[in-house]
Amino acid sequence: MKNEEKREKIEDIIKHEEGIAMATNSLHKVSAEYEAYCLQTSLMKGELDWRSGMRDAKLEGRNEEKLENAGKMKAMGFSAEQIQAVTELSMETIARL
């Protein structure tokens, strides 16, 4: 349809052939519906990606807070078992503090 000569011929055929005209109309309808579906899907994916990123950021913030608290507890003389009970960090993580 980008070639002017061909477009005119195609449009002429569509005007004179009822079956082709109906098929063309159906194709345009399906194309518009599919385009709307793709847009909606893209928007939903963007929303889910954003929410996932926010969840990951919250988890990362919580983990940083746990590490900070564990460091304070270690400086105050708490045992590794006590620190683990409070922060739920692994013993390996606590040992690296």
Image (spheres, rainbow, N blue to C red):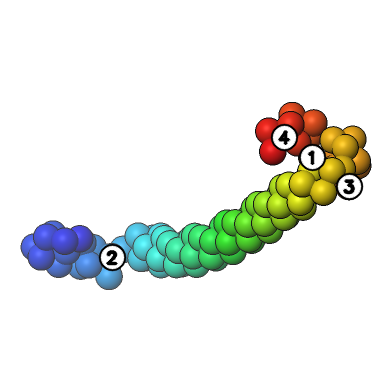
* SS for callout 1: loop
Q: Position of residue 28 (x, y in %)?
A: 40, 65
- Please report the residue visible at 82 percent of the width from the left and 49 percent of the height from the top: 76
**Residue, disc 1:** 89
| Label 4–label 1 contact, CB within 8 A | yes
Q: Is residue 54 left or right of residue 4?
A: right
- Please report the residue visible at 68 percent of the width from the left and 52 percent of the height from the top: 64
Q: Is residue 87 above or below residue 33?
A: above
Q: CA distance from mark 3 to mark 2?
A: 75 Å
Residue type pointed to by label 4: Thr
| Label 4–label 2 contact, CB within 8 A | no
Q: Quadrant of residue 32?
A: bottom left
Q: CA distance from mark 1 to mark 2?
A: 70 Å
Q: Position of residue 47 (x, y in %)?
A: 59, 64
Q: Residues within 10 Å of mark 2 (few under 14, many from 20)?
A: some
**Residue, disc 4:** 93
Q: Is residue 56 left or right of residue 40?
A: right
- Please report the residue visible at 28 percent of the width from the left and 65 percent of the height from the top: 14
| Label 3–label 2 contact, CB within 8 A | no
Q: Is residue 26 above or below residue 71?
A: below
Residue type pointed to by label 3: Val
Of tags 3 and 2, which is closer to the observer?
3
Q: Position of residue 95 (x, y in %)?
A: 74, 31
| Near-viewer residue (64 or 13) | 64
Query: Quick one: which residue is furthest to the bottom in this view?
Result: 15
| Label 4–label 3 contact, CB within 8 A | no
* SS for callout 2: helix
Residue type pointed to by label 1: Leu
Q: Which mark is residue 14?
A: 2
Q: Between disc 3 and disc 2, whose residue precedes?
A: 2
